[in-house]
Image (cartoon, grey):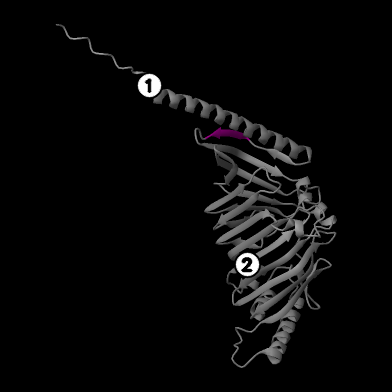
Amino acid sequence: MTDAPAKRHNRRGLYAPFILVVVVLTAWSVWWLYLTRQIDSRLETQAQTLRQSGWDVRYAGKSITGWPFRTRLGLTQLELKAPSGHALDFPVLNAEANAYQPTKWVLVAPEGLMLTRAGKGQVAVKGDAIRMSASGIGQTWPDLALEMVNPVFTTQTQAEPFPIARAARVEVYVRPHLEAAATPADASGDAIDVLFRLVDGQGRADGPVEGFAQDGKLTTQLEATLDKAGLLKRGGDAAGVFAAWARAGGAFRAVRGDLQAGESRATLSSPVLGADGNGRLAGVLTLQAQKPLPALAGLTASRQGAVNRIGAAGAVAAAGAAQIAGQAAGQTASQTTEQAQTPLTLVFRDGRTWLGPFPLAPAPKLF
């Protein structure tokens, strides 16, 4: 009696996982290629749209890498110049997103950037990190976050001085206003919330920031709701990106924040701040200050022509009188001078910053 031949096992089951992997990998690669082509197409379309609006957009090189799970867009010698003359130049700008979540991007400028201020010259910006994130791409307003870690601002030859020389951090956050529908002043129903934070900023030598901070460091946080924000998407003209917005009645609303300069501290608030026809800030800003005299006195020592020394000296006297009056009116014996709150009011009008009847300096310029 002979043994029956052994039954052969079907080996197709062994190959099934490998076949499945190849199929999935092929499908994913097709998706990745489609995604990168879409990104490339949208980049070129957006650049062309900006050019048609009067912007100058250039880059020397472009690459898209990151397969299989990421999409990395690299641009070299990127130049963005607005019709107003303001510009940003990046030696290298890298943008990255997960291929499975292309609505969230992180942008990094590893070699810093060059900021061109129209009529004022260039400022080189470098730091340990300069990055921005954008999430919710495709929404009316995505969430934006800009972060600079240990930035250094270097004014270039023949350019006007930049107010800040360096800082520990500079942060800017933008998001859709959570109560836009309840903002009657915003006729378009399009508003955004903006937060600016400067940590341990150091002013340039002999400049107003250095004097205001009493040779110390300036830390400030400001937040506001910017209404009629949709006007900003139309791009800037020769007057700047904020010009049409301001002419249409755009304003910063519910402004609040805090400031620390050397020994001086203050909380800030304003119901509304806008801009005049020359692009200078206009409105009233209320301060509750602790020890304001050293900061105001520091302005009188500034050697820069932007600060009105006579006005600053008058403001010191006025602030001193307000502090004494406040102590006489409401301070208890247990309250120390350091804890005392001195109410002050800054008025931005006629292109100047006023404390009472005393002009301190030009009002901040938006455009």
The answer to whether residue 366 of the structure is visible from this angle is no
Amino acid carrying label 2: it is Thr
Q: Secondary structure at mark 2?
A: strand
Badge number at residue 281: none
Measured as percent of width and height from the top left, residue 287 is found at 70, 75
Amino acid carrying label 1: it is Tyr
Return the disc, 2 or 1, that comes first in the chain's sequence: 1
Q: Secondary structure at mark 1?
A: helix
| Near-viewer residue (143 or 336) | 143
| Near-viewer residue (152 or 62) | 62
**Hey, which residue is sitting farthest bottom in the picture?**
333
Q: Is residue 62 magenta?
A: yes
Q: Quadrant of residue 279?
A: bottom right
Badge number at residue 15: 1
Magenta part of the protein: which range? 60-65
Measured as percent of width and height from the top left, residue 43 is found at 66, 36
146 to the left or right of 235: left
Measured as percent of width and height from the top left, residue 300 is found at 70, 76
| Near-viewer residue (108 or 22) | 22
State the quadrant of the N terminus.
top left
Mark 1, Cα crowd under 10 Å, few <14 / some 14-19 / many 20+, is few
Callout count: 2
The answer to whether residue 242 of the structure is visible from this angle is yes
Residue at image position (82%, 52%) is 244
Badge number at residue 220: 2
Instruction: In the rendered view, tell whether residue 111 sits above or below residue 333.
Output: above
Residue at image position (68%, 45%) is 139
Residue at image position (58%, 69%) is 217
**Hey, which residue is sitting farthest top in the picture?**
1
Most common secondary structure along the magenta stretch: strand
Measured as percent of width and height from the top left, residue 157 is found at 66, 53
Instruction: In the rendered view, tell whether residue 88 sits above or below residue 333.
Output: above
